[in-house]
Image (cartoon, rainbow, N blue to C red):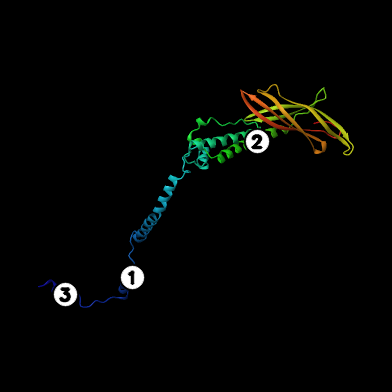
Amino acid sequence: MSIKNELEKSIPTSIKFTKKDRADILAKINQSPNYKYQWKPLVVSIFAVVLIGISLLPTLQTVEKTTIDSPLATTDTRDESQLVESTAIKPLPPLTEEIKKQYYAQYVKIIEEAMALKSGLNIAVGPMEDFEDEYWISPEEFKKNVQSWVKQHLATERERINNYLITPEPVITNDDGSTTKKTYMYFPDILRTVEVTGDFETQYDASHKRQLFSSVENVSTSLIKTQSGTWKQTSYKTALIDDGRTFSIQIEGIFELNTIQYEKRFTIEFYCDENGKIF
C-alpha cells in the first residue's frame, strides 16, 4: 500500500460549501496582511535621509573650510577692536629701507598738518628705528587714521563744552571798564575753564539806531586758579561781524600739564545789545 493511494482515499470526492463558507474564504483571500510594524515606509525614510546627507556633504565641507580660512572666524573672547584692525588694514608687501624712509617722511608731514590745526591734541611720530614691521601702513591709511583722531577729538570737545554752555557763566564788567567772559578749552580727557578779558568800545550808529561795537584792545586770557596746569596765550585776532553787533576773537596759546604741552586755538564771541551792554 502506497502513501499516494492512502491520501487519495482520504480526500473526499466532492466538497460542498455553503454561501457563508464561500464568503469567509473570499474575505480571507482579499484581506491585506496586517503586520505589527510598517517596515516599508521606514526603509524609504532612512534611504531618503542617507541620500540627503550624501548630497550635502560637499556643501558642509565647503562651509567648514570657509569658516576656518576666513579672518572673521574668531573666538568669543577676541577683542572687537582687534577684529576691526585685522580686517580693515591691508597688509603691505615687504618694504625696502628706501620706501620706509619715504613713508616715514610722509607720516611726519601728515602729523605736522594735523598739529597746525592746534586742536589741543598732542600727537607725534616715534623714531623710525623703533618701527616694527607691523607698524608700517600706507601713507593714505596713516592720513585717514590721523584725520579720524582729530575728527573724534573735535566732536568730543563740542559735546563736552556745549553741556557746560547750557547754563553759561555771567559776563562781568570789571572796575576798570574791561569785560570778562568765561569759556572752556578741551584737551584729551581734560576740560579747563578760561577767562577772556578785553577792553571794548561801543558807539551809537544812526543808521541802525542802536549801539554797535567800534573797537577792542588788550585781549588777555587766564585759567581759573583752582585748576591744574598752566596756560600761556601766544596771539589773538579779532573780527567785527553781524553789522557790528558781535566781536569774534580767535585766541591761540599753549596749555601745559605734567610737562606735556598742547597747542590750542579757540574762538569766543562777545555781543552788545542796542544800549551798548556787552555780554
- N-terminal-most mark, 3 or 2: 3
Between marks 3 and 1, how big is the CA–CA gap? Answer: 30 Å
Reading the image, the residue beneath label 3 is: 8
Q: Secondary structure at mark 2?
A: helix
Q: Are marks 3 and 1 in contact (CB under 8 Å)?
A: no
**In which quadrant is the N terminus drawn?**
bottom left
Work out whether residue 225 or residue 257 is closer to the camera in this orientation and state it: 257
Amino acid identity at mark 3:
Glu
Instruction: Give the quarter of the image for residue 171.
Output: top right
Q: Are marks 3 and 2 in contact (CB under 8 Å)?
A: no
Residue 182 position, x and y percent, is 74, 28
Which x, y percent locates residue 105? 56, 35
Task: Kindly check if marks 2 and 1 are in contact, taking CB atoms under 8 A apart as contact.
Answer: no
Residue kind at label 1, given as amino acid type: Asn
Which residue lies under the disc numbered 2?
154
How far apart are the two marked residues, 2 and 1, measured between alpha carbons? 92 Å
Q: Is residue 163 left or right of residue 62?
A: right
Tell me the tag on residue 30.
1
Front residue (pair 17, 190) = 190
